[in-house]
Structures are given as C-alpha cells and as structure tokens.
Image: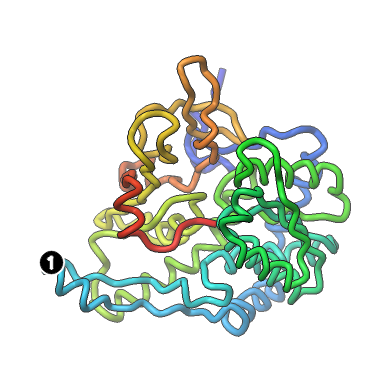
C-alpha cells in the first residue's frame, strides 16, 4: 500500500513526506473552492495584471538589494547584500501574500477576511489590504502578543480591522490560529481565511510560497546585475517560513547556492526551551495542524506548546540537502537577526 512517505513531490500539495490536507469536513469545500480559484487565477491575465500592479504601485516593489559595505568591511570576507523587504508598505514581506489572497477573496465573492497574527506584521498587512479592497477584516491575536505589540494593534484598528484578543492557552500565535480556524468553520460562506505562513492544508503552503516568490525572483536578477554571478549562500530567518521560501524558491535549481534558514534557538536545546523544528533533533513526522509536518513532543508524547508550525517551506531544498537550518540562541538572535515572521 502506498504511504504518505512515498508520495512524490510532484503531487499537488505534497512536499515529499510533508503537506496534504487533513481537515474537518466543514472545511473541505472552502479549501477545494480556494484551490480552484487559485488555479484559475494563475492563468487569469486580469488577475495577474492587478496583482503585479498592486505589488508595484501599492506595496512598493521591487525592493532594493543593498550592498552592506560596512558589514562586509567589518567581517573582511564575503560581499554581503541585504534584500530590503522592510521598505515595503507596512514594513515587511507579509504584504505580498496579503495582496494575492485579498484579490482571491474578491474573486471568490467573499466580503470578509479572517487573519491571525503574532508580532502583528501579518495582521497589519491583512488589515491594509482589506481596507484597500473594501473587505471586512477580523484579526485574532493572543493577548500576550497584543500587550507586546500594542503599536501594531493600534495600526490594525486604525485601518478598520476588528482585533480580537485570545485569552486561551498561552495567549500567543498558536492560540490565535485556533480561534481564527473556529471563526472560519462558522463563517465559511462569506469569509476567507488569509493565512500568512507556509503552513496548513493545501493549497495554502503552495499559494503562500508562490505569492512570496517575488522576493527570490527579484533578488536573483539583482545579484546577477550587481555581481554577474549567483550568491554562494542565502540566509533567511525562519518563523512561519514565508520569508525564507520566498527567497529560496527561485534558487532551488541552482545546486551551487547553499540556503541557510535561521530559527529561534531560545534559551537552549532542551524541549520547551526553543522554537526550532528543522534545526532540532527531537522531531518526528505526523499529522498536525491540518497537514503532515515535523513537530516535537515531550516524553509522554504531548505536543510541545512552543513548537507547532506545520513548516513545509523546506520543500525540495530541504529534501535534497540543499538547505540547512540553524537555531540561534536568544542572546545572538536579539543582536544579529533581521525581521522575524509575524
């Protein structure tokens, strides 16, 4: 009998042993609807034209590839370039995917979008796109995150979004996703769930990857113009994976380009002390968060609360050993890392 582990990467929604669609029956119809709408949108010239127009004239693409001259001089080694996604409207790469999914919601006749957010960047991007497209927007956010990110909460509300505080569980992102899913199950007829990370049931991982792939397409062209060659290494922070796969995807066929994803190393290597999945050694494969993914558990097989993302952004790069994942401790990540996933 064919098992999940032998399904080839060419199967839609599968990334080697990862991916798929494990959801309540209530969500199968909206997921099929979303998959059909996305497949049609990929070949719809009017949709693509509007998407590209908004990326350019609303979000502010292309973003520059900046040569970090002082950092290069200080390290005295490789020539370092920074892909400046922070210069986009709303201040992060999240706007790329929010525009794409917002247009899909309009195409499907859904007047309302639901989103979740942790650091607030995805929530701000979703609220911004909803305001521009005339959509209602409800953003779920853990109350712990709301206290830490009060400025982003204010921005979302100024944009007309309803921000719902989540008091359950750890009061952070994973609990916000639970509440967003409950809302979607209840309101599937008029609502689209605008998921911001490369996780969840098909077609979300593929769709988010494709909307974010503009990062890598631009970076590839820009580095070739600047250096007349491809980079030896790509580095990206890894939270929900949309930033990293957005950069990595265009380089997957370039075997000489090494891709390094940096995860949050937290306080140490022990379970519950970090948020690293791909760089950790305690992982196992199983169905969780409506897709097959790598997760961590304690000695009694209980899922660890800090490690929950169904991260399939590794895609073929991880499976071919082209990508490497490293967990950095909190002391280093605070001093060294760039923008994190929202």
Q: Nearer the viewer, residue 202 or 113?
A: 113
Is 316 situated left or right of 91 in this image? left
Count of number-bearing discs: 1
Q: Residues within 10 Å of mark 1 (few under 14, many from 20)?
A: few
Which residue is at a point 60% across and 36% down the rendered structure image? 291
Residue 164 in the image, given as x and y percentages of width and height? 75, 53
Image spot of residue 72 (x, y percent) = 19, 72
Give 18 or 9, whichever is nearer the viewer: 18
The residue drawn where x is 57% and y is 52% is 197
* Residue 300 shown left or right of residue 136 in the figure: left
Kindly tell me whether residue 321 is visible in this rendering.
yes
Compared with 255, 100 (above or below) is below
Identity of the residue furthest to the bottom in this view: 57
Residue 42 visible from this viewpoint: no
Q: Residue at x 27, y 80 (%)?
A: 226
Please provide percent x and percent y for residue 254. Answer: 31, 58
Describe residue 123's horizontal placement relative to residue 88 as left or right. right
Q: Quadrant of the C terminus?
A: bottom right
Residue at screen point 47% across, 60% down: 246
- Name the quarter where the N terminus is drawn: top right
Q: Secondary structure at mark 1?
A: loop
């Amino acid at each position: 009998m064919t098992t999940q582990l032998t399904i080839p990467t060419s199967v839609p929604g599968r990334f080697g042993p990862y991916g798929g669609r494990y959801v309540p029956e209530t969500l199968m119809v909206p997921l099929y609807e979303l998959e059909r709408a996305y497949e049609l949108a990929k070949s719809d010239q009017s949709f693509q034209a509007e998407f590209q127009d908004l990326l350019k004239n609303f979000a502010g693409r292309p973003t520059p590839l900046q040569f970090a001259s002082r950092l290069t001089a200080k390290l005295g080694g490789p020539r370092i370039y920074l892909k400046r996604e922070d210069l986009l409207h709303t201040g992060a790469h999240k706007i790329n995917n929010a525009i794409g999914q917002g247009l899909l919601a309009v195409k499907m006749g859904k007047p309302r979008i639901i989103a979740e957010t942790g650091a607030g960047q995805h929530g701000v991007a979703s609220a911004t796109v909803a305001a521009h497209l005339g959509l209602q927007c409800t953003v779920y956010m853990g109350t712990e995150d709301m206290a830490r990110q009060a400025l982003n909460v204010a921005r979302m509300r100024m944009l007309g979004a309803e921000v719902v505080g989540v008091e359950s569980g750890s009061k952070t992102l994973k609990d916000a996703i639970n509440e967003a899913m409950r809302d979607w199950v209840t309101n599937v007829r008029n609502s689209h769930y605008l998921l911001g990370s490369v996780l969840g049931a098909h077609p979300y991982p593929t769709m988010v990857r494709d909307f974010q792939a503009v990062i890598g397409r631009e970076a590839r062209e820009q580095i070739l113009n600047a250096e007349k060659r491809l980079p030896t290494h790509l580095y990206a922070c890894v939270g929900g994976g949309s930033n990293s796969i957005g950069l990595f995807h265009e380089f997957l066929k370039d075997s000489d380009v090494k891709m390094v994803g940096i995860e949050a190393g937290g306080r140490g290597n022990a379970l519950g002390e970090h948020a690293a999945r791909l760089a950790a050694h305690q992982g196992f494969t199983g169905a969780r968060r409506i897709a097959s993914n790598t997760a961590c558990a304690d000695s009694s097989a209980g899922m660890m609360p800090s490690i929950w993302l169904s991260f399939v952004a590794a895609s073929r790069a991880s499976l071919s050993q082209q990508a490497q994942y490293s967990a950095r401790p909190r002391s280093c990540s605070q001093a060294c890392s760039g923008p994190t996933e929202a």
